[in-house]
Amino acid sequence: MAGQSPKLSVNDLFRVKWLLGVTMAMVSVSSLFNLGSHTKPPGAVCFAVLAISVAFPKIYSSAPKIIWKLFAFSIVPMVSMDVLAKETIPALLNLNTWLVLYRGLNHQKRREEMQLVLLCLFLLVMAGMLTNSLVFGVQLLLYTGLALAFLTVGTLLNSKSQGASEGIDPKEAWKHHEGWLRLSNRARYRNLAVGSAMFASLLGIAGLAFLFIPRVDVEDRVDLFKMNAVSSQTAFSESVKLGEVTNIAKDNRVALRVDVSGRTYVPAMPYWRVLALDEYEDGGFSVSPVLKEMIELKQVTPYNAIRFWNDRWFADTPSQDVRRDRWTFFLEPGVSRFLPVLGSFRQLTFFDLDKVSIGPYEHAFSMEETPSKMVSYQLEGIDFSATIPSIDSYRHLQDVYLDSKNKRSEQESDFPRSLRDLPMDSASREYIDSVVTEIRQGMPMTPIDFAARATEYLASTHGYSLSSTLPPESEIKDPVARWMDAGLDGHCEFFASSLVLLSRAAGFQSRLVVGFKGGSWNAFENYYMVRNSDAHAWVEINDGQGNWVRVDPTPGSGLPTAAPQTVVLGSQVAEGGSSAYVDSLRMLWYRRIVNFDEQAQKEVAIQIKDFLLAYLQIAEEWASKGVKELYAWIVAPWSVKKFVSTTASLIIAVLVLLYQRNLALNYKELLAAPFRRGNPIRRKASKLLKKSERAKADISEDLSGRRNKVISELQRLRFGPKESWNDPRIVFREARRLL
């Protein structure tokens, strides 16, 4: 047929279906790259094999069938190694990965096509639920479109081959393959348009289902989707040694995102507090055993925390107090089991309070384990002061002192005596005491005054540097004391550790605090981006009046104060560039998709209701106004202007109607022509020819001759070259009269 490219043959459809299936498998396997190291090697191997098969399909098609049979049998021993190592989730993911590779390259039967679709879906959903990443959303969209196209082409292939698609010889199908580019040139734009419309419709239905289907927490109901993180990305655990926080600062990945609402002012330099460490030994700080055990045994939970704080509330849903500020935290996978907080607060909202354990003495809030997926929680009514209320009653620790046999444990905790721990060797203690004497100069000082003087002393004797080496061991055994004695430059851990030891030697309770300092403001979506490079260590000193006061001795941080400086929300120096924009998309994904719960559903329903009511009200006003204006125009007396305008409108309407009837194509056909396959004149001639076949009228011989002549002209328009055409407009007008 002139002017049209040949349709796809059975072998062409076979190759297109195979390409769609392999591409779908590649998208599914790529989701493994978002997970840990367990699944990346199998995913990389499978992805490479699939990509090579797409690039060289003739080599793949010539491979003996025995290779695939041997590969199928080898899957069991490959997966059994993970099973023997008691790695259930990685074993399941790896098994699914190898099955996707096998079925992705071999799917000729209809049931094999369905197996491939389900295997890819299962692998993609498994990886997505373990990460909740933005990439998962993109991969899911790609998978949906590819799966829809894959099943559609499979149905077309089965229809075109008259049900014999399973009997197609793959070698014969690939024998005349001339490349994917040439095959794509033979595809119809109409097929692409229809597929795009189907995909858009599916997305619309999925969007409605997402908005209105009740929320179900699959992780709580199916243990299959619970996967522990291998290690903490930030190393913020119950013990921190010199240099560990600085090593974290070398990583520029985002660890925490914080969305702020209901606040006009925010801290100029926020401190995201993770954990306080009280026990000191040989340059390292850790949580006292009794406090650690208190968290592990869940002695204090959100349900009984009122014993320590009567002004705080822990809930699984936000409060209804619209006057409160709300800080929504999005903690990245693998960061820490402890929830970063911004000082004291009025309410902490967490989706599953049963998984939270509280350390009241160190003001810590711990999950059961380091999460392997993004965790969100919310704080309300945050206090921006640099103080945290101290708990001076230690009677609750007696519950932890007893072991499972209801006897006092042999190893009793040193807490709260650990808040005054100093180095064990006498030389280190003598040096630290000498520094304290130099700072005090014989004057009595409050804890805060001493902390300020000690901070000034450290800044005058040491500079700041991320790279620091300790001097060789001497009479002074303790590494922090040796650093102070040598006058070397150092990072935040050296300054904070030094201040803790100096404060304790002066007789004041103090402890090391680790977390994050600062963060950048993302102006695209208006939230804080806190990176691992913002990891920091500072000090909290007990002021003797029921408060722990934050002191940051690192040079440039300023002296301790109870009222930190605040700035207008959004006035911070914003981070721009492509990386900030990409991160804003991730934040948008967290806000609108991952964090979309039952409460968000209700809010969306209310917004839709308000929008529809407002729209109906506007439409009603427009209709009422239009009817009134029409009525006023009708009842108004005739004037020259009214007569001329009415007559001109009627004349224009008649001319437009007559002009349209004289066109070869009507307006509807002209508008639809760019979106339909083939020549619009030939398409309309075909439609009229079909109409003539259905029409069986008893007409005269003269009309029969004219009718046959019109049919002949229509056939010329339908099948003949354009050079032989008569005026299509005249032919179509005559056809409308006679047919």
Image: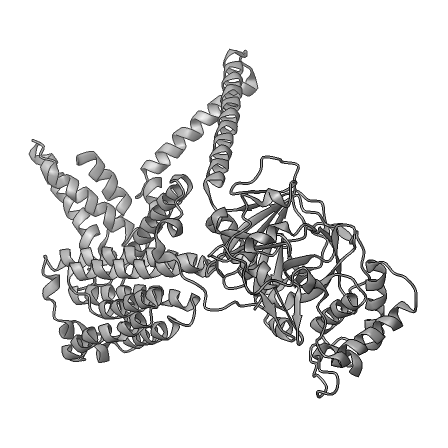
**Image position, residue 381 (x, y; %):** 66, 43
- Residue under the image location 15 percent in, 62 percent down: 109
Q: Reply above or below: 424 against 655.
A: below
**Image position, residue 426 (x, y; %):** 75, 79
Q: Reply above or below: 625 against 530.
A: above
Residue 262: quarter of image: top right
Which one is in front, 349 or 524?
Answer: 349
Which one is in front, 129 or 109?
Answer: 129
Question: In the image, is 167 to the left or to the right of 39?
Answer: left
- In this rendering, does residue 493 appear at all? yes
Question: In the image, is 184 to the left or to the right of 266?
Answer: left
Q: In the displayed image of the protein, which residue is found farthest to the front?
A: 407
- Residue under the image location 55 percent in, 55 percent down: 400
- Residue under the image location 55 percent in, 64 percent down: 410
Give the position of the N terminus as an image quadrant: bottom left
**Image position, residue 26 (x, y; %):** 33, 67
Residue 461: quarter of image: bottom right
Q: Reply above or below: 352 against 467.
A: above
